[in-house]
Amino acid sequence: MHSYSRLICFVVIVAALLAPVKSRAAEPTFGERLGWRADQVVVILHVDDVGMSRSSNLGATEAVEKGVATSWSVMMPCPWVSDIAHYLQQHPEVDSGLHLTLTSEWKPYRWGPLAGKAQVPGLVDPEGCLWRDVPGVMAKASAAEVELEIRAQIDRAVTLGIPITHLDSHMGTLFARADYFAAFARVGIEKGIPILAVGGHSTFARKENGNATQELRPWISKIWNAGLPVLDDLHTATYDWKPEEKTEKLIGLLGELKPGVTEILFHASRPTEDFPVITGSSESRSADLAALTSPKVGAYIQDHGIVLTTWKEMLVRRKKAGPITE
């Protein structure tokens, strides 16, 4: 994915959702509310785009099995989902969410909506696939169509026996319009599945996304009060790091994190022969895998007492926290 697409992805994970209305200096982090100490840095090292290709699946499984990755999310409309479903049947302990997918961005390699064109015509481009970018979706698709597709992707995961520990959004489309996010949040709350929501200090989220509307902010308390966990921060800029710098950049980032729970996004892949035909980001994605499996990164995490967690653990902790209101 180009850096422009990455920007679209998460001008999206809007500090809209994230930016506090008032100072949180005196308030506990969401990490603390979930039972970690006030001074603890807690991290989810997350791999996006699982199921997109064989390369994506190989990279994600290697990052979890041999590296420090703790979570991933699956693109349900994509051709290699059955492969990862078979893996998860043998490895049900993996923290596996859904990377809810409303776009199909690559030129030669594409997919369509699981709900079908007749049900969600606004999500379909002239090729019969999902739109290539977020503005295309925003211009044509209603929130009702978006919700139908969310439900279709969840239904497909259930049919395949894929565990759903959380829901997030490919290219951030579900954060691009308030009515899309409302549909996303409603489904997560209805089904009791954690969704990507950042309501804490949001240090990196706001830095990366600039000044954004706060119209989604009221959903944070609704999500938390519905019994679902909330992140303190989100870092999405690893895609734009130079491949040769990713391991050192990750170590540097880990040293900058504030207490609370932060998710850091990666696109770790083990490129196969056809992968460069799909995307020009093979080198970047391979470097993500190298960083997540680097002994230097693992040693830094251990030596500095950084706590690694999963969405699965977050939900267990949220249930133990009881009816704490935001």
Image: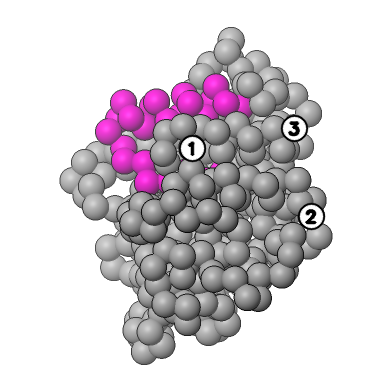
Residue drawn 36% across and 80% down? 298
Query: Was residue 153 drawn as part of the magenta stretch in this picture?
Result: yes
Measured Cα–Cα span from mark 3 to mark 2: 17 Å
Amino acid bearing label 1: Ile
The residue that mark 3 highlights is: 138
Measured Cα–Cα span from mark 1 to mark 3: 23 Å
Tag 2 or tag 3, which sits nearer the N-term? 3
Find out whether the residues at labels 1 and 3 contact each other: C-beta distance under 8 Å. Answer: no
Q: Badge 1 local density, few (<14 within 10 Å), some, or many (20+)?
A: some
Q: Quadrant of residue 268?
A: bottom left
The residue that mark 1 highlights is: 189
Left-right relation of 133 to 223: right
Res 14 seen here? no
Q: Badge 2 local density, few (<14 within 10 Å), some, or many (20+)?
A: some
Q: Which secondary structure dominates the residues rendered in magenta?
A: helix
Which segment is the magenta one?
A: 146-169
Q: Is residue 104 above or below residue 312?
A: above
Question: In terms of depth relative to the viewer, which is nearer, 230 or 323?
Answer: 323
